[in-house]
Amino acid sequence: MEDRSRAGVRRTYERIGTHFSKTREYAWPEVESFVDEADACETALDIGCGNGRHAALLADVADRVVGLDASRSLLDAATERVGSRVSLLLGDASRLPLADDCVDLAVYVATLHHLPSAADRRASLDELARVLGPEGRALVSVWSTAHDRFDAPEDAETGFDTTVDWTLPGGETVPRFYHIYAPAEFERELDDSGLETVSFEISSGNCYAVVVAET
Amino acid sequence: MKEDLMDIICCPLDKHDLDLDVAERDDEEILSGTLTCTECGERFPIEDGIPNLLPPDMREEAPA
C-alpha cells in the first residue's frame, strides 16, 4: 500500500535502490551544461544525489562536494561510485542538515517531485535558499505536465499527484509518489519561496530552473 | 565522513552546531560515532562512514 509520507518515500527507495541505481548510469545533459558553465568553487551540494552520477560532475568544479539522499541503499551505490570524491549524507531534503550560506553550487534534480506534500516541497525550496551563499546558484528540476506520458495540458495552472510503479527484476511493482508539476505552478512555487529564478526552461518533459537565494 | 565536514553540517531540526564523538576511524575518515546537537541534544549516528542526519520521524521505522 502506498505511504504518502517522507518516511514512506525513503522506504520505497530503500526497497528499490539497488536496482534503481543500475538504471541511472548517465548524467542528464541539462545538468552537464549547468555544471560546465559554473565557475570553480569551494562547496557544491547534490540534493537527492542517488547513486552520485551528478555529484561526480560537481567534483570536477568544487573542492568539496556533499551528496545528500534519504535512502541509505542509494548512498551505498554512491559510495561505490563516487565515495572517494563526494561526502555523503543521509538526510531529508526539506530539513537540510547544512549551515546557512555554505553552498556555492547546487543541483536538486528529479527529487523535489517525490516530496509528498506542498508544504514539504515549499519548505525544501526555502531550505535550499537558506544554505545557498550570496554568490550561490542552483539547478532545480521537476517532472512536468509537459511530458508526453501525461494527458494534462502543459499550460495547466496546477499539476497533480500520482504514483508511478517501479518494476523490480522479479516482476514485483513498487509504487512511487510523484507530484507532476504544471510549469506555471513550478514557477509560482519558486516565486513564493526564498529563491529567485534566473532562468527557466522545459526540456524532455522536465522543468529546469536556475535559481539564486533572494537578497 | 571526513572530519572537515563538521565545518558545514548542523542539526537538521534547529540548525545548531553538532558535537562529534568518534568511535572508530581510519587514516582519512570517521567510520562510526555520534553527532549530538549542542542545542537540542538530539543524537545522530555515523554508520559505516555516513552520518545519518535524518530527522527522528524519518529515521525510525514507524508503521506505515
Image (spheres, coloured by chain):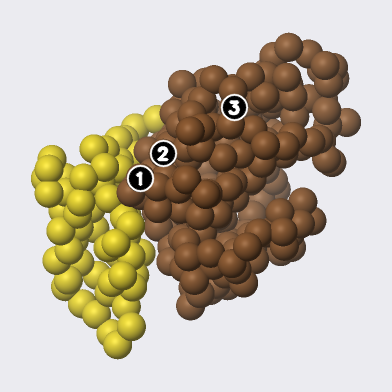
Chain colours: A brown, B yellow
The disc, 1 or 3, on the residue closer to the chain's N-terminal end is 1
- Would residue A145 be found to the left or right of residue B51 on screen? right
**Marks 2 and 3, how far apart at CA:** 14 Å
Picture coordinates of residue A161, whole percent (x, y): 64, 21
Picture coordinates of residue A5, whole percent (x, y): 44, 29
Question: Please, what is the three-letter code of the amino acid marked with disc 3?
Answer: Leu
The chain containing the residue under callout 3 comes to A
- Asked if one can make out residue A181 in the rendered structure from this viewpoint, the answer is yes
**Marks 1 and 2, how far apart at CA:** 5 Å
Mark 1 touches mark 2? (CB < 8 Å): yes
In this figure, which residue is indicated by the disc labeled 3? A190
User: Which residue: 16% across, 45% down?
Assistant: B42
In this figure, which residue is indicated by the disc labeled 1? A100
The disc, 1 or 2, on the residue closer to the chain's N-terminal end is 1
Picture coordinates of residue A142, whole percent (x, y): 67, 36
User: Which residue: 55% across, 54% down?
Assistant: A105
Do the residues marked 2 and 3 share a common chain? yes
Picture coordinates of residue A112, whole percent (x, y): 57, 36
